[in-house]
Amino acid sequence: MLSLLLVSFYTESFLVLLSRCICNMQKVLQWIVIIIIIIINGNAATNDKRADRKLVTDSDSGVISIDCGVDESYTDNTNNFPYQADDIAVIRFGQTRNISSDYEHSNPGQINKQLKSLRSFPDGKRNCYNLKPKQGKNHKYSIRAYFEYGNYDNKNKVPIFDQHLGVNLWRHIQLIKVNSILRSEVIHISSTDTIEYCLVNTNQGVPFVSLLELWPLGDFNVYQPSLTLLTLDLKGRINLGGSKFDFIRYTDDIFGRSWLNRKIYDMNPKKTSLSINLDTLDNTYKLPIEVLNCAVEAVNLSSSLEFMFNHSKDEEYYVYLHFFDFLSNSNQKRIMNISINGPDGVTEPPLTLEYRKPTTIVMNIEKGNGIDNISIEATSDSDLPAMLNAFEIFRVIPETFLATQQADGKFLLL
């Protein structure tokens, strides 16, 4: 009888212990499930934040594109470029405005959407964006600002103001007409981790900006005129041989450059339909296909390509001439003489173009000379007329200080 009682006691105890273990295991399993759900949701939220953060700050390439005056970041379907809003970072400074619908453009270089809004700065003498590219200091950048007044304030009077890069005067901003579009661009090697872009009130109207961009130029040996840290102000970037007068930038241009297509009537426009593979091409300046596949050619061997200018003698310049011969063959040579300001000006040794090989000639025009004209002509032993695809002209900006003064102005951290 005693043994039966002991068996019964131990059996009940075992069942109670087993029940408690099962209950505890269920609780443990419940907690494990809860933790797994939290981790999954946490990762999803983190991924969402990362995706959003990647859109509203800068892309993997380090490009910063700020659509001034908008309150939400977005990706433009016309060019697949991400644009960030400046409202959160600059809510204390400036005012967001929209241009009049009477002055909206249909397609000015695929930036018509970005030109509809702007940020104006009616208060303060100097207001600055403090750009922080991920590459940091000692790197080369293309910094661009676009402006369209568009009678946003109903005053029908275009303002005049200054644009600074740090403490250095970049240029005076003066649009020609109410509906004019102005692009301002510099090539800049930053000596600091941040780059100040500033608008300065000169008592001739309220400063504003429509679009602000920073594009890293990477480790490519482009726009590097000397060992000094020169800042270059773009005077003109012309793509030749196009079918119409147009302002455009191309999606395969990894530097995001804007090109002005020009049709010149006393030259022969040329265009090729041959396939061009940018991945295999030795293309130092990374020219887009649309620049490589069109050009202008002189009317004949005795004619020259002539481009007239009126650039001041008070400045120093760098001229970049881009060539890509898609017309030659193995039996014909294209050899050219190049001069700026005539045969007594700045000249280059005779240039022989190789078939389908991009070539860029860089010419320095020292202060005191200006630029009156660029002339390209075939030599006496050339089989083909002179030819040119595109050119760029930059002015050297005199530097006041190497680094920016962080204490100046109001800073809009981006």
Image (cartoon, helix red, strand yellow):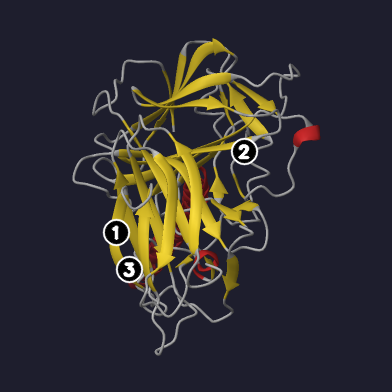
**Residue 288 image position (x, y, % from top left):** 49, 64
Residue 28 seen in the figure = no
At 29% from the left and 20% from the top, the residue drawn is 405
| Mark 1 or mark 2: whose residue is earlier in sequence | 2
Residue position marked by numbered label 2 in the rendering: 72
* Kind of residue indicated by mark 2: Glu
* Kind of residue indicated by mark 3: Leu
Q: Secondary structure at mark 1?
A: strand
- Where is residue 285, by image quadrant? bottom left
Q: Residue furthest right?
A: 102
Q: Secondary structure at mark 3?
A: strand
At 70% from the left and 28% from the top, the residue drawn is 178
318 versus 91 height, above or below: below
Q: CA distance from mark 1 to mark 2?
A: 50 Å
At 26% from the left and 34% from the top, the residue drawn is 192
- The disc placed on residue 351 is 3
**Residue 260 image position (x, y, % from top left):** 57, 51
